[in-house]
Image (tube, grey):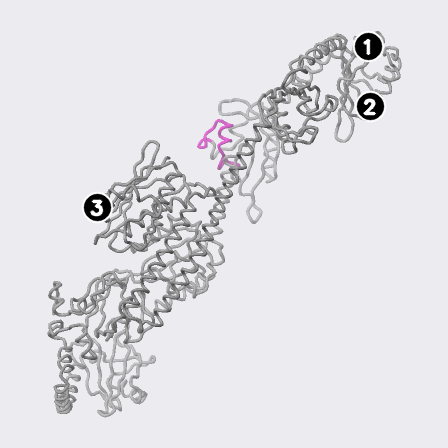
Amino acid sequence: MEDSQFHFDSEAFNRIFPFYILLDQNLLIKDSGRSLIKMLPDLKKTEYFFHSFTITNPFPEALNVDNFYKVTNQLVIIETVKEKISLRGQFENYEEGYLFLGSLWLTSVSHFEEKKISFSDFAHHDASLALVDLITDPDKLDAKLQNYFTTILQQEDKLKSATAKIYDTALFDAQNPDPLIRIDFEGGLLKMNTAAQNLKKLTYQDVDYDLQDFFKFIAPQINKTEEKWGFEADSNHEHYTFVCKTLQEERYIHVYGRDITEQKRNQEELIRLSLVAKTNKNGIVFTHPDGKIFWCNDAYIKLTGYEKEDIIGKTPVELGSNSLSNKEEIRKMVSAFYEGNTFEVEILHAKKNGGTFWSKTVGQPILDSSQKVIQYFAMIQDISEDKQKEEKLLLLSSIADKNIGAVVICNKEGKIEWVNSSFTKMTGYSNEELVGQKPGHLLQGEATNQETIKYLKNQIKQGLPFTCEILNYTKFKEKYWVRIQGQALHDKQGEVIKFFAIEENISQEKEFNQQLIDSENRLASLITNLQSGILLEDENRKVLIANKRFCDLFDFKGRPEEMIGFDSKLLTEKNIHFFKKPNEFIERTEEILRNKKNVFSEEIEIADGRIYERSFIAIPKGNKNDGHLWTFEDITIKKKYKESLEAEKEKYRNIIANMNMGLLEVDKNDVIQLANQSFCDMSGFSLIDLLGNKASEVLLHPEDKKLVSFKNKERVKGKSDSYEVASINKKGETRYWLISGAPNYNVNGEIIGSIGIHLDITRQKSLELQKEELLKKLEKQNGQLNDYAQIVSHDLKSPLQSIHTLVTWIKEDNEKEFNPQTLQYLAMIEDKVEKMDHFIQGILNYSKVDDIDMIAENINLNDEISKIIDIIHIPKNIEVVIKNELPTIKAERFRMQQLFLNIISNAVNYIDKPLGYIEISFEEEKQYYVFAIKDNGPGIAKENQAKIFKIFQSFTSNNRSTGIGLSIVKKIVENYNGKIWIESELTKGTTFFIKLPK
């Protein structure tokens, strides 16, 4: 018989089932019968089923979307939450949701009267019609009952007889594929259907029986007092289960058989798979089609650290994902899951303790016969160690490849397997030309030292480390020197498997060493011909080097080389008459040698009136003295010139002393060398107080000492600039100076210190400090205002919450006593409290808009607006659309959230159309972003459009309106030097435009 296809239009379906309820997969009401709507006019589409109804029979566990299927295919009584009206019927699966088919269950006439239900509101086939008729006429009910009882008694006997015949006929139907057998209490075969006759033999507990012999064997074992008794047996390689039902009065037993071969195989296979999964060292999970885990093995528990109770009912994504997980890999897994495909992903998997491990997850769907996914299987492997090795290998490869030194790896035969880029660059050979070759065959040439080649071959042959310097040739036959350091790599058994070497190009070093030798020769020649007298002595004062100029200065008649080896002490004593103050010269010389500290430009008077300048440089070697160097220069002319120059300087000092601005000259150590009279007047110190002292120590506030130290270092670099400092005059008063500083040069163009021109700006600075103080006070007052807003918000919200709670309690405790007017007043109180709460929150948000502590950051507006849409309760009839990809802007996150939240929530609250629409878009200009938020709400009258951004302005009766939201928006936009305006038409909607600079 072919399956029938039924199709009903809405009118026909309502005639047959006028009390039906259609639910979607989330238990939201999609549609309902017209008679039900007549009874319950407040019932709305998209409303959650359990908001309006409860299920009173049967009494299952707490029902929800996941377990609602448990009430299908059985008698169900549902009751309305408010009216307490019952409906009787059943739920059935329909498409992805559920369909309730039933009727009004009338328990009193009042239900019929109160809801104004008429006979036309019932289907013609509805048995409740008769019940309605009887309920409304009690006499007719009594007569009907008497008639029913008489009829029932008369038909009872007929029914028993007919039932037995029908049962027998149905039971032993020849078309029934299951074996059905009737035996007597001794096991004799009384009746069988065709499927039972085909069994012929049964194998039970490894013993084969004919059908008749088997039931004689099994009959005594059947417990005839039990309602059902069962056993399993095999026949023709098929496995059957049998259920025995004893009929005591008839003295026979019905045996119902069922072929469970496939089920048994599946069960055995499942057991085997379960054992494999349970003992698998990798994590194994099975999930329902919705992704929720219903089984996992011990390895998964051990891997993740979760208890089994934590795992069951969760999805792998909920358990495994964390902030470090690769979102693309997770999307790949989820996408494959919902498409019913296999997948393989690697993600950083979370643990319960907050830790992570690298996992490789392989998943595949389990399909039923119709190729529909019924379960999902996934194996989770810990690959943390492999990842670490991989990362380590990548790191080592990267280090080796990017190493400035050339790196080469050879096999145990000495042939190249791998080189880094430095090696190819150094040799000129490509990677392809090098791999498989021995380095010596390509790189060594006629000038390569044969002893070095022999050393390398011997070390490599013995698997020993090697270090040497060798001359190699590039591909283009250019010579270069390398320092090689290498060693053999061994396996666990100690066998050589590879050779690893690092080669450093030391061609420049070799060239430098040769240059050093040449330089030493040139230096010796230079010293010989210097215009300063040079005398180099060893630690015992024996002459090592003396140049010609030294011989000339001290009237030594021989050649400089002849002085080498002389004792300097004896030479000095022999020529003591040469010095104007001989004893003083000897004592000072011995003092310098004892101290072994460098001395520079020390003046010595010669007997004939000349003046020499002497310097001493110690030559240390480790912790010992390896000799010393004396230099002598005739500065007689220079000395006289310097004295003449000092006289000139003194003349100019007198001129500077009378300037109105303070002038100060310091050396490179900040020691005061000169100050004019104006500076003395400014500071209160006399010139005697200042000279020889550090300027920063005498004159400056501690906070500015580092600044002046930095400026002095800048002077040494030749830089000039101006800056401000706080100084302390001799009276202890703080004065502020503007200093224009520049480096001070000597006659040779060398920087010897700095010169500063000082201007007293104390009065100007005082005004500036007053301004800063005012700004600080203003900032503090702003902070106090913000704190005040927070405190007022808290102190006002607390009693509001108490009022709301008290009103709720009053309503709950006196619901039946209050008349509708009183309940209306209480509802008005609740509305006003809620509006006051929104108002206070608005004031608080308004106070936060100017918070200067907010930090600007890069904000992806697509993500932020998506979060806002998730936060706001958006009714099903309103669609929010982001028209084009929004930009990422630099701004404070809180302010951007407030800006878009207020505008979008306003649009949601005020849309009055059956189908609401909100569109968010933007256009990019050269220097601005222009955003548009468009809705199809009621629109704003032209006379009110200029006022909507003013605080406490509201032009709607909506209880949620506080008149603050749009003023917050305008304040935020203006803080960013932006612009906001609207275009609106009554009944058609409003578009808000926001223009923000990039």
Q: Residues within 10 Å of mark 1 (few under 14, many from 20)?
A: few
The N terminus is located in which quarter?
bottom left
Q: Are marks 1 and 2 in contact (CB under 8 Å)?
A: no
| 13 relative position to 179: left or right | left
Q: Of residues 864 and 903, which is closer to you in this image? A: 903
Q: Residue at x 11, y 64 (%)?
A: 11
Task: Check the image and report above or below for 904 versus 451.
Answer: below
Q: Amino acid at mark 1?
A: Phe
For the residue labelled by badge 3, is the local secondary structure a helix, a strand or a loop? loop
- The residue under label 1 is 554
**Residue 731 visible in rendering:** yes
- Label whose residue precedes the other's in the sequence (2 or 3): 2
Q: Of residues 241 and 413, which is closer to you in this image? A: 241
Q: Nearer the viewer, mark 2 or mark 3?
A: 3
Q: Amino acid at mark 3?
A: Leu
Q: Are marks 1 and 3 in contact (CB under 8 Å)?
A: no
Q: Of residues 267 and 363, which is closer to you in this image? A: 363
Mark 1 to mark 3 CA distance (whole Å): 112 Å
Region in magenta:
414-433
Mark 1 to mark 2 CA distance (whole Å): 20 Å
Look at the image and say whether residue 427 sits in the magenta stretch: yes
- Label whose residue precedes the other's in the sequence (1 or 3): 1
Q: Quadrant of residue 69?
A: bottom left
- The residue under label 2 is 593
Task: Check the image and report above or below for 626 versus 266.
Answer: above
Q: Amino acid at mark 2?
A: Leu
Task: Check the image and report above or below for 553 versus 498.
Answer: above
Residue 156 got which mark?
none
Residue 986 got which mark?
3
